[in-house]
Amino acid sequence: MSVLLTGGLGYIGSHTAVELLQSGEDVVVIDNLSNSNIKTKTNIKKIASEKRKISAKNFKVYIGDLRDTNLVEKIFTENKIDSVIHFAGLKAVGESVKKPLEYYDNNINSTLSLLKAMNKFKVKNLVFSSSATVYGQAKSMPIYEDFEVGATNPYGRTKLFIEEILKDAYAADSTLNIAILRYFNPIGAHDSGLIGEDPNGIPNNLMPYISRVATGRYDHLNIFGNDYNTHDGTAVRDYIHVVDLAKGHLKALKKLRKNCGLQIYNLGTGVGYSVLDLVNAYNSVCGNKVKYIFAPRRPGDVDICYANVDKAKKELGWTAKRNLKNMCKTSYNFECKKSKLK
């Protein structure tokens, strides 16, 4: 049996593929390469092969769009899929404000295509890649899973709508097992430097932009807003290392296979750092190479957002292990290695 990863060549998907393969799972990926690179397939195999011989039988990749129902059915027909981890989707807050219809079309319709195929082929286990953005501007910190939800931007609303779709699907079929994982802010890269966050074009996320400034690809970083209600005026987020996050998916998958029903978990560190905290930590690693200027706030961004992670610790046996310095160090290592390769 195999685990299907939608968007499995992307940032979080690739790290999760490595963890799954190394743990003995067979993996099938679908990815449209809109924000990833086919070379990632080779690097996933290279890393995973350090612990296990990886062949075409263990790791298959299909290039195409999840909204292509014929392709999705082909994947389910050709492979014995036991579980699905659903990463595929557009994910930039600022871009979603400018292109809301594109976000609703891509994120929601791709999910519906996947759920229809799962229903047809009687696949019951699903881990969904949600986001802390579904909490909107929470009234207090830290954020618990039972907090009121209400996204402040189209990206967050697509995640929120998909969560509602999954709840309705579960209400109609209680044999489904669904883990909704609300990520906080994934950063960092694999220790090997072979995979990390490498978006096509200009990055929408903070860390890859910082890394490209540090390696000289960009002149400076724009920090959006310095008038937030925080200790230094810049937005505060719960940054989590992507490898810790990937390991959380394995724990969630194990939970699903015990017929857990529908569960929601925060995945974060439980600690909030500001943008300036992150930049200063990065500069301590790379030698003060990150210049920055302040720019106006972006629409849809909230002041402070960090998690309570007690539920994941108690029910999944999962906690984040890596600190902010390691997140910065591995990001810098990845960017340096990638730049030299180019």
Image: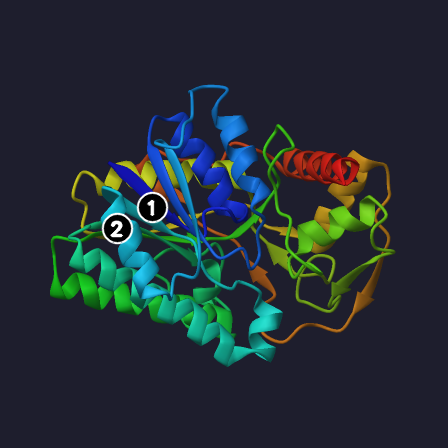
Amino acid marked by disc 2 = Phe
Q: Quadrant of the C terminus?
A: top right
Q: Name which residue lies at 71% across and 34% down.
A: 333
Residue 237 lies left or right of residue 291; in this view the side is: left
Residue 188 lies left or right of residue 26; in this view the side is: right
Q: Is mark 1 on a helix, strand or loop?
A: strand
Amino acid marked by disc 1 = Leu
Label 2 or label 1, whichever lies nearer to me, is: 2
In this view, the residue in front, 173 or 271, is: 173
Question: Which percent across, then down, holds residue 54?
Answer: 42, 26
Question: Which percent across, then down, holds residue 226?
Answer: 75, 66
Question: Which percent across, then down, holds residue 335?
Answer: 72, 40
User: Which numbered disc covers residue 4?
Assistant: 1
- How many numbered marks are there? 2
Task: Give the labeled residue for mark 2.
Answer: 76
The span from disc 2 to disc 1 (Cα, nearest Å) is 9 Å
Q: Name which residue lies at 83% across and 48% down.
A: 290
Residue 301 seen in the current view: no
Residue 147 seen in the current view: yes
The answer to whether residue 97 is above or below residue 317 is below
Where is residue 314, by image quadrant?
top left
Here the colouring is: rainbow
Question: Which percent across, then down, holds residue 266?
Answer: 40, 50
In this view, the residue in front, 217 or 178, is: 217
Q: Check whether the beta carbons of the residues at disc 2 and disc 1 lie within 8 A of each other.
A: yes
Where is residue 322, by image quadrant?
top right
Q: Is mark 2 on a helix, strand or loop?
A: helix
Crowding around mark 1 (Cα neighbors within 10 Å: few <14, some 14 to 19, many 20+) is many
The answer to whether residue 10 is above or below residue 169 is above
Among the two numbered marks 2 and 1 on one chain, the one whose residue lies closer to the N terminus: 1
